[in-house]
Structure formats: C-alpha cells, structure tokens
Amino acid sequence: MRNIEKSIAIILIITLMTLNLQLNLYQANSQNTGSKGQRIIEIYSNYAIIKDELYIHGIEVNLTQHIPKQYSNELFMVKAYDENGEINVVIEDGDDEVKIVVLGEVKGKVTIETYLIRHLKTYAGKYVFQYPIYPILDITMENFNTTIIYPAETINVTTIIPPTNITMTDKWQATFTQSPLPIQTTIELYTSFEAKITPILIDKIIRWVSISQDIEVKDEITVRNPIDTTLKRDIGFKFTMPQGISIYSVTDPLGPVNYKVNSTSTTTIITIYPRIDLQSEWTYDFTLKYKIPREKYISGGGQQETLTIPIDTIIQTPIRQMNITVKFSDGTKIVDYTGKPAKIESTTLKYDLGGLIAKDHGLSNLKVTYIPGQTPMQIPINILAYTVIALTATSTIYLKYRFSKVKTATKVSYIRAIYDSYLKEKDLYIKLKETIRRYGNGDIGRKQYLEEKKRIMDEIKALTDKINEAKMKVESEEARSKMGEIEDEMEKLKALINRIEDIEEKKLSKTIKRVEYQRIRDANE
C-alpha cells in the first residue's frame, strides 16, 4: 500500500512539474508577443553581410541563431550588438549545423552581423547566391522582413526563388515578408544575377609602414580566386582604397605588373592585371607600394604625436591574415600604444591580425603615441641645382651606353619566354590530370586515354626543349636561381600526376578499397 501511495505521489510531482514547464513556456511566448525583426542581405563582389536586427519584446531570452551546415565554409566572422554596444557571441560548429550563440540573456534591440566569403558560385555565366531568407531562431517573431541588396555592378537579376518583387533604384533589391515567423523556420533563398565583378579573397598581407615626413607603405599581398571560374588577366581585379593615396608601383617576382588607377571624391580604385590567368583557387603574389596622407593618420605635433595604425587602406575586401610592422625614424621614443603588439623594439612595433573586412575607411582603434626622432634631411635648392648640372654633364655617357640596354632587353625577353613556357607546361599537367580523372571515372577507354596522354607528354617535351634552349642565353644568377625553384616545383607536380595516375589504375583494377582511394585522392587534391 505504501508503495502505491509513493508511486502516486511521484506521478503527481512529475505532472505538476510538466504543467509548470508548459505554463512557463506559454508565458514566455505570450510575453514575447510583439517581437519582430528585419534581415538585410547585402551582396558585394568579395563578401556578403547578413545583418539581422531583432526586437525582443517582453522577457529576456537566450538567443541562438542556427545556420545550415552547408554554409559553414562561407562564415568569415560574426559580430553582435545590443543598445549598449558590442556583445560577445560564440560559434558552435556541430555535425548538422552551426550555432551563433549570444552570451547571456538579451532583451530589446539586438543586432547580429554575419560576414560571408566564398558566397558566390557561377552557373551559365551568371553569379548565384544562396542562403536562408530568414534567421533560424528558437523564438517566434510576430513579423519579419528581409531585403536582398545586389552588388552595384549588377546588370540584371535573372532568377529568384521563392518568387518576389524585384525593384531597381540605386541598386537591385528584392523583399520578403513572413508573419509570423515560427520557431526554426527554414526557407532557402536562391538567386542568380549578371554583374561585371571579379570576386577575390586576400589570404595574407605583410605590411611595412615607414613613418617619417610621409607615411610610406609596402604591402606583400597574396590574393586568391575563390570562385569556380577563371579570373582573366586582361580583366584583372580591383582594390578600393581611401582617397588621397599615391600609388608608386605594383610588382610580382618577375617585375612590374600593369595597373590602372581611378580616383573619385571619396576613394581610389586600383585595377591590377596579373601576369597570368587565375584558375579557381589559384593564388597570386605581388607587392604594392604607396603613400598615404599623413594628416589622416597622424595627429598632434611638436614634442609628441599620435599615429593611428593604417589598417583600413584596402576596403571592401576580406583579409584572412595581416602582419603589420610600423617603423619610426631613428631616435623616436614610443610613449604609449593600444592593442597587443606581437613584437616591440626601440622604434618598431609589429601586430598580427586576422579576419578583417574594412567596409569603409574607418580609422582603426590601434594607436601609437611617440616623440618623433630625426626627420629626413631637406636638400637645399643649390644642391639640387648642382645635381641637375651633373646629370646634364653625364648625359653623353648615357647616350654612349644606351645601346647596351638592347642586349639586356633581349635577355629579359628570353626570361619572359621561359616563364610563359613554364605556365603552359603547368597547364598541360593540369590537362593531363583531368584526362587521368576521366579515364578513372570510365568516361574514356584505355586506348583513347593512352593516345591523349602521349599527345600531352609530347607537348610537354617540346616545351622542355624550348626552355632548355632559352636558358642557355640567360646569364643572370638570380634568374637562374628562380628557374631552378620553378623546375623543382614542376618535378613535384610531375610526381603528383604520377601518384594520381597510380591510384586511378588501382581503382579500376579494384586493388584498392573505396575509402582508401578517396583518402589518397583527397590528400593529393
């Protein structure tokens, strides 16, 4: 009897707890009645920003946003704000989804900014963008609006699913409305559009900043083609920089690179034409030298000055990593600084930064206060005059030796020919890889495969002979050293092709397990 009474008591307690939980959930939902929000999806050439403004009405809640797993590789960074400023978020990467968790309970207006890279695909000559139309939340919103804003260079919006109205003012836009927006609502957006853009991603910038009378900057930059089509060298890619910047030069390891500068009232746009076409996921290294306006970055004067460290000189482009070294003139005394420098010496500071997108030219919060050292010597006018006379006197010497430059130019032409041959050789190896892959997938028979392989290898041999012939006419030790490095890379590429051919043969002969084949193939890719 006692056991029966005890069991009944336990059941009653569980029932009361369940009713209480349901009551709390009902009260939470009823108290959150009136919550609403809006999402703005701004698509740019190099990134997209998803801005969610949520107005939480009633009680404080734990706020979590869910993102389908297929978008995890596109996430670049996330920021969140309430009415008092920036708040902390945690990104939890699960098996099926990614969670953006706002730390602590929130109420009132909360803004979540999600930045995407690799956000564009291509299909039939058009750019394609996909993402959830509405934020996937654990709370019900009474009303929610979403606006899609296309790049300024968009010519036409060709597809949008689900269908909705598309308008054109300054930019192409599309709008959606959901009332109410239930818990965990997942509606995917698919849209395609035509635009004159060349998406790029900056893997790394090594920046050297020299502070004297002017602010001189040298950027060693690695850019990547993040989309699935070729970036043509004759089209090039663009950097947007603040107005007032003076470009000195653009070079890559082989010398000067063509570029064009267009200035507006607010920005400087530089178009860089790489030496080669950039296939999907290829990187390109180059060096950009320029001067930035002193008055925009240095304040104070006399005994003490403050430098705002120039981080935002390349805007509208994601930067995965930046190492910035600031070098002051000799005798400078560093008084104070903000942030956490990776290295500090007498007149030098170094910062290591990551995950940057400068949406516009906003001065950074990294500052250095210092007492200036020696300033560069000003050359008197009379010295300049004597220099002009000396140059005039030596002009005949220049004329005497000018024709020797023809020989140098000829040597340079040999180097260019060798470089172009190396690029063609690399393209042939890539073509051979695709032929091997087609053979491994059963798209072509063994006879056709061997014929195509022989034809490609013959072309490679002809190029190698051409390179060896041209190399005999190059005397520069530096050029020979660089060619040796390239040949080492070509040998690695050749070995890689042999490994790919070997695993495809093993797959066809069924002497390797599918799992092991996939593992080796992924490693070689």
Image (cartoon, rainbow, N blue to C red):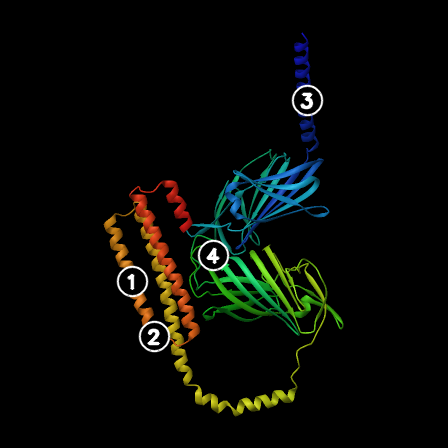
Find residue 392 and report its horizontal and vertical position in percent: 53, 90
Say which residue label 4 marks: 225
**Cα separation between marks 4 and 2:** 35 Å
| Depicted 411 relative to depicted 74: above or below | below
Residue sitting at x 35%, y 63%: 424
Q: Which of marks 2 and 3 is nearer the N terminus?
A: 3
Between 369 and 134, the one lying in front of the other is 369
Which one is earlier in the sequence, the residue at label 3 or at label 1?
3
CA separation, marks 3 and 4?
A: 57 Å
Percent across and percent down for residue 161 are 49, 41
Question: What residue would you read off at disc 3?
Answer: 17
Pick whichever of labels 4 and 2 is earlier in the sequence.
4
Q: Are marks 3 and 1 in contact (CB under 8 Å)?
A: no
Task: Provide the secondary structure element on which disc 1 rests.
Answer: helix
Residue 229 in the image: above or below residue 398: above
Q: What residue type is labelled 1?
A: Glu
- Which one is closest to the eye, mark 1 or mark 2? 2
